[in-house]
Amino acid sequence: MKTLTEKIEDKVKQAFAAAGYDPELGHVSVSNRPDLCEFQCNGAMAGAKKYHKAPFVIADEVAQKLAGDAAFAKAESVKPGFLNLTLSPEFLAEELNEMASDAKFGYRGEETPKRVVVDYGGANAAKPLHVGHLRSAVIGESIKRIEKYAGNEVTGDVHLGDWGLQMGLIIEQLRDMKPDLPYFDPNFKGPYPAEAPFTISELEKIYPEASARSKKDAAFAARAHEATLKLQSGDPACTAIWKHIMNVSKKDLKKNYDSLNVHFELWKGESDVQPLIPGMVKDLQDRGIAHESQGAVVVDVAEDSDKIEIPPCLVQKSDGAALYATSDLATILDREATLHPDRYIYVADKRQSLHFTQVFRTARKAGFVKPETELLYVGFGTMNGKDGKPFKTRDGGVMRLENLVADITDAVREKMAGSDGLPKDEMEATARKVGLAALKYGDLSNQASKDYVFDPERFSSFEGNTGPYILYTIVRINSILNRYRSEGGTLEESERHIGSPAADVEKNLGLCLSRFPEVMETAREELAPHKICQFMYETADAFSKFYTNVKILAEPDEAKKKSYLSLLTLVRDMLTTCTDLLGMEVPERM
Ligand code: ARG
């Protein structure tokens, strides 16, 4: 179905044509003065020049053509030449009923479905997760769900950093910790043990220790570098340890992501594409796309229109080693061969912007992707602590995700202390769901590129623009609907009908809901979950005003009561859909 704005625009365009003007002048947008009208058209202003007439005269003529249209309660021209439009309650109700009977509330989704890859999460195996990885997971998961909702075929890939120096560091630290392991015995004939020589909690300590040590101990750093090279050239002992690291680390990462309700279709990593690299670099050189520069291999990607200098993309260091960009380019080759994406979406820290510019330009220059393939990068800002500096734990360390979730769950539990009566198990599960929603909404309600302050107290509040407030709205509506049913009322789909809104609070709520398809379109096109949050908050707020001013279950007229409850059902269904698109879950009670 067409969006509400499109429907109104059609009418206004027809009116322009009927009055003898170019219909294209009839562009309509949601009013930026909601106190004056609901929609507006400024076309008469633009038409004034073309037709050598005062804009007000044109606006007046068009308004007259619209006068008989039942869609409008008011279509008036105001000086100097605007058209202010207010919908009739009947027309709005008709629209809402049409939306309610559509599986996606009138959202058409992507015109031609696309194959989409979302590259997000981006954890590094064996290294601690940090808050940047949290943001990537939360934002990426939401973008993935938005793309799916648009009808696209979407693959999420965690793209693990699993092939770097961290592996050499761990191997050498392990050698010093447990020299008797068979991996370090040059005469060992194998096979190597199936069991890992460390647990996850040991592994978690090994990397930071080794990393700190390498900064002070040059000999150790050199050993780690060498072990990394050995691993990369297929040494059996190093490979065996690497496999253990990967198994232990992946299991832990899966647990972490699961607890965030973040799920990847693919668990690939940089290591998976290493075999493609030598051929790729050679091909780039053979075709003259890459050239040598001081022993390294680079691709020039600067463009005349650049406002800042874009240095060449480094694909091979002078010692022959591959780099971050090399892995990303080889990953594109792999994805082209296996997934044939129409659209790539990378969700990573905004400080990686230059990296993605270089990779995208190289991929295009080399023809790795079709010219029409979209290469998109969502760069997010930093999650800061209340001191305005990048978030750290009290002791200055980087917070583990588990602790972060636990912190906010604690804050939620405290606020829920008043809701006695919930059995202990349900209370715990609910606090977790609400806590996670608080965390995610706190992140997603900001434009991704902006930094934001992690504030468990504010995020977990049941009032204001927060996740818990949205969930509470849904839970409250469900409880009204349940009460109606428990008192013998029925509201089968066939009985649902939204009547023409009478009160302002009712009409405002309806108007909020009517924006859903447009909000989804924008959120998809701009890869902007915060637009969905904005919609949710406005809707929840409009509901709250409606609820305060209109008696619902006490309404004596049964048809009117059913109309209110049908409206509430639509609010509940849309908000629930939105929570799912953000990766939040709705508890039964809270
Ligand atoms: N592992 C990287 C990091 O921790 C993020 C990966 C982002 N994705 C990509 N395809 N480069 O910074």
Image: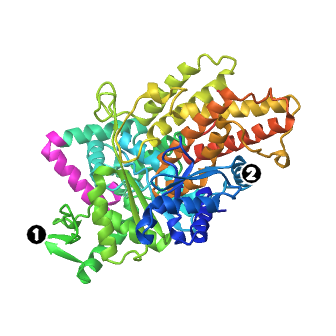
Q: Nearer the viewer, residue 227 or 452?
A: 452
Q: Which residues are magenta?
A: 215-238
User: Which comes before the other along the chain, label 2 or label 1?
Assistant: 2
Residue under the point 40% across and 74% down: 369
Q: Is mark 2 within 8 Å of ligand 1?
A: no
Left or right relative to 90: residue 367: left
Q: Quadrant of ligand 1?
A: bottom left
Vertically, is 173 above or below 236?
A: above
- Image quarter in which the C terminus is found: top right
Q: Give residue 364's quadrant in the image.
A: bottom left
**Amino acid on which disc 1 is placed:** Gln
Q: Is residue 218 magenta?
A: yes
- What crowding class fits label 1: few (fewer than 14 Cα within 10 Å), some (14-19), or many (20 or more)? few
- What crowding class fits label 2: few (fewer than 14 Cα within 10 Å), some (14-19), or many (20 or more)? some
Nearer the viewer's eye, disc 2 or disc 1? Answer: 2
Secondary structure predominantly adopted by residues drawn in magenta: helix
The residue lying furthest to the left in this view is 294
Q: Is residue 160 visible?
A: yes
Q: What residue would you read off at disc 2?
A: 97
**Amino acid on which disc 2 is placed:** Asn
Q: What residue would you read off at disc 1?
A: 294
Q: x, y (%) of residue 94? A: 73, 52
Q: x, y (%) of residue 21? A: 53, 71
Measure the alpha-carbon separation of dots 2 and 1: 68 Å
Q: Nearer the viewer, residue 512 or 520?
A: 512
Q: Is residue 144 visible?
A: no
Question: Element under label 1?
Answer: loop
Question: Element under label 2?
Answer: helix
